[in-house]
């Protein structure tokens, strides 16, 4: 899978299930400390100063890549991952609603009415302008 391909629904569900099953965070990495037994860069779960759970060991201590990997893993604890999944789901739902609004053919007019509140009376509005725009123009304007 390449980075420019969108996640499938199954892939997103798998990521979510893994995050829900993972050791609760927050996770942390401290580049000044190494795992006492393995002498590897390690990611821990749990607050500082108390016994912690080792979440991952990434390789030899002081290895630049092992240090970068540990920092990345620590930043992707389950809560962070679940927030990202929720954001993707929210944006996809929003996009579905937008797609549904623009599901008409390219020449289907989209009627937009602009209103102005009557001076001195906040309960009644006066139509100022009514515009019909072809759906294709709206799609083009909103295209990424």
Image (cartoon, rainbow, N blue to C red):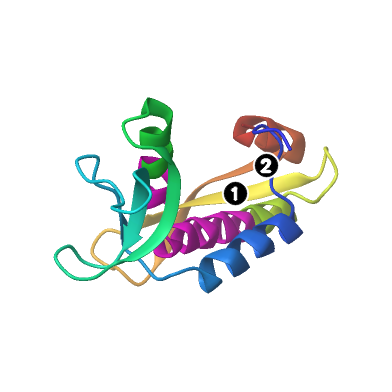
* Mark 2 / mark 1, whichever is N-terminal: 1
> Of helix, strand and loop, which one carries label 1?
strand
Q: CA distance from mark 2 to mark 1?
A: 6 Å
| Residue 90 is a magenta residue | yes
- Which percent across, then down, holds residue 137? 70, 32
| Number of numbered discs visible in the structure rendering | 2
Query: Which image quadrant: the N terminus?
Result: top right
Q: Quadrant of residue 48?
A: bottom left
Q: Is residue 82 left or right of residue 122?
A: right
Identity of the residue furthest to the front in this view:
37
Which label was assigned to residue 59?
A: none
Residue at screen point 38% across, 61% down: 54
Res 23 quadrant in image: bottom left
Q: Residue at x 59, y 49 (%)?
A: 112
Mark identifier at residue 132: 2
Which SS class for mark 2? strand
Badge 2 local density, few (<14 within 10 Å), some, or many (20+)? Answer: few
Q: Name the residue that disc number 1 marks.
A: 112
Q: Quadrant of residue 143?
A: top right
The percent coordinates of residue 44 (x first, y second) are 33, 59
Labelled pair 2, 1 in contact (Cβ < 8 Å): yes
Q: Is residue 45 above or below residue 4?
A: below
Q: Quadrant of the C terminus?
A: top right
The residue positioned 48% from the left and 63% from the top of the image is 82
Check disc 1: other Cα within 10 Å, few if <14, some if 14-19, many if 20+: few
Choose between 21 and 39: the one closer to the eye: 39
**Magenta span of residues:** 71-94
Seen from this angle, which residue lies furthest top? 64
Query: Is 78 located above or below residue 128 in the figure?
Result: below
Extreme-left residue of the structure: 49
Picture coordinates of residue 121, whole percent (x, y): 28, 68
């Amino acid at each position: 899978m390449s980075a420019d391909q969108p996640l499938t629904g199954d892939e997103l569900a798998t990521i979510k299930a893994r995050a829900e099953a993972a050791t609760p965070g927050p996770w942390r990495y401290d580049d000044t400390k190494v795992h006492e037994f393995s002498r590897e860069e390690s990611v821990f779960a749990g607050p500082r100063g108390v016994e912690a759970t080792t979440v991952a060991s990434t390789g030899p201590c002081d290895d630049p890549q092992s240090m970068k990997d540990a920092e990345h893993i620590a930043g992707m604890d389950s809560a962070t991952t679940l927030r990202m999944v929720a954001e993707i789901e929210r944006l996809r739902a929003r996009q579905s609603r937008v797609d549904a609004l623009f599901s008409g053919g390219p020449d289907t007019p989209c009627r937009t009415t602009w209103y102005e509140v009557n001076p001195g009376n906040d309960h009644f509005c006066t139509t100022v302008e009514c515009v019909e725009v072809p759906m294709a123009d709206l799609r083009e304007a909103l295209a990424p």
